[in-house]
Image (cartoon, rainbow, N blue to C red):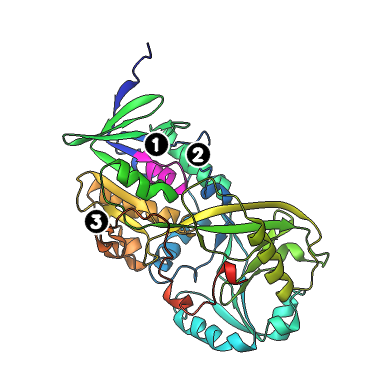
Amino acid sequence: MTACPSRQVFDVVVLGGGIAGAALAAQLAGDLRVALVERESQLGYHTTGRSAAMYIPSYGGPAVQPLTAASRGFFQDPPWGFAGRLLSPRPVLHVARADQVQRLEDFAHQNRDTAALRRLSRDGARVRAPILRPEAVHAALLETGAGDLDVARLHGGMVRRAREAGAVILADAGKPDIVREGSRWQVRTRQASLIAPTLVNATGAWADETALDAGLSPKGLTPLLRTAILVDAPRELGFHDWPVVKDIDERFYFRPFGGRLLITPADEAPSPPCDAAPDELDIACAVMRFHDAADHPVTRIHHRWAGLRTFASDRAPVIGWSETSPGFFWLAGLGGFGIQTAPAVARLAAAQVLGHRTPQDLADHGVEPAAYDPGRLSATRRPTAPSAPGRDPRVADRPPGLRAC
């Protein structure tokens, strides 16, 4: 006869051990009894563990940019448990061909108040990234406030702070059973049965499935697959200090990464929630787009991977209480911006869970909770296949995606 799991009582159960769930658990654990539950054996296994580790103030549009700006101070001077500064400077070079110059101008105008941008000529851009083909860059903008983030130390530090503040962390929990019992939620895992009045849905690509399991309507969140490859680095001196080179239409970017060159076609192929794997066509597309822009042969691919970036229809994060189920809190739809916004997102979410006002420094950066309220998204029937999300306004006229490579 199989023994029943032990019953444990908490104030909050956070589902999902990626950066969003871990950061919120770290923020709450000093005030509440918190359990952090991860279905995989390794916390942060999916999107968090596959991040390209970038901090880009211009990225994500008007809903994301305030959260990014409000997180910079944490990255530059983190508290105990993170072993020092988490952000290292690395500019982003936004490049435009002759036919893309107007979009570069629009980008500069839209981000004039949110990012430090400096105009560069073709020659100036090719000094920064010498492998760029002359025909691939007619004009460029250098975003100087960007940088690299140490994702492993950031996520590990959040988990460590949560644990040291008293949070219970359960990994390898499998898919939990979620039941509403009166005014409390019961989450049954392989190890234990957890009881709490507040349940946080921080399950990334599985967020809509988690909502359905809990008896809620989904929000129409769509996981989008992003492919990346690592190839041999160019032999030019100073390669380590090159910027991220990013097409203004986001059809590719490349950058130094772990001593090699990371290339992505910046694809956004709708996908069911899964352990994402790269497709050979997507890899071929990455190489083709890179070769169109850069004079550097790809003769060997050292590593290839894919991750899922999950978006709501308006591409803004989903942070806040369910409008239909008391005690159910959404922390989802963070797209590709969950790492660079994690400190601010965690503080915003913690304030709402605790019933506090939005921290003043977040408000000073323009963070408005209403922009992320789950109630803005109408109830959505469970789709039979993911549908393409709405686009960030600043890239509304982006050329067709991956399959039009």
Disc 1, disc 2: CB below 8 Å? Answer: yes
Split into 4 quadrants, where in the image is the N terminus? Answer: top left
Where residue 236 appears, x then y in whole percent? 82, 67
Look at the picture and state if 271 lies above or below 152.
below
**Left or right of 165, for residue 134:** right
Instruction: Identify the mark nearer the N-term, 3 or 2.
Output: 2
**Splitting the image into 4 quarters, where does residue 144 fall?**
bottom right
Split into 4 quadrants, where in the image is the C terminus? Answer: bottom right
The amino acid type, in three-letter code, at marker 1 is Leu
Disc 1, disc 3: CB below 8 Å? Answer: no
Mark pair 3, 2: CA separation: 30 Å
The amino acid type, in three-letter code, at marker 3 is Arg
Q: Which type of secondary structure does the marked residue at label 1 adopt?
A: strand
Read off the residue under disc 2. Answer: 43
Read off the residue under disc 3. Answer: 357
Where residue 165 appears, x then y in whole percent? 39, 35
Read off the residue under disc 1. Answer: 36
The span picked out in magenta is 14-26
Mark pair 1, 2: CA separation: 10 Å
The answer to whether residue 136 is seen in the rendering is yes
The answer to whether residue 20 is seen in the rendering is no
Mark pair 1, 3: CA separation: 24 Å
The residue located at (74%, 76%) in the rendering is 132
Give the main secondary structure, helix, strand or loop, of the magenta stretch: helix
- Mark 1 burial class by Cα count in 10 Å: few <14, some 14-19, many 20+: many
Where residue 98 appears, x then y in whole percent? 64, 88
Where residue 11 appears, x then y in whole percent? 27, 35
Q: Residue furthest front?
A: 384
The amino acid type, in three-letter code, at marker 2 is Leu
Q: Which type of secondary structure does the marked residue at label 3 adopt?
A: loop
Number of numbered discs overlaid on the protein picture:
3
Q: Residue furthest left?
A: 182
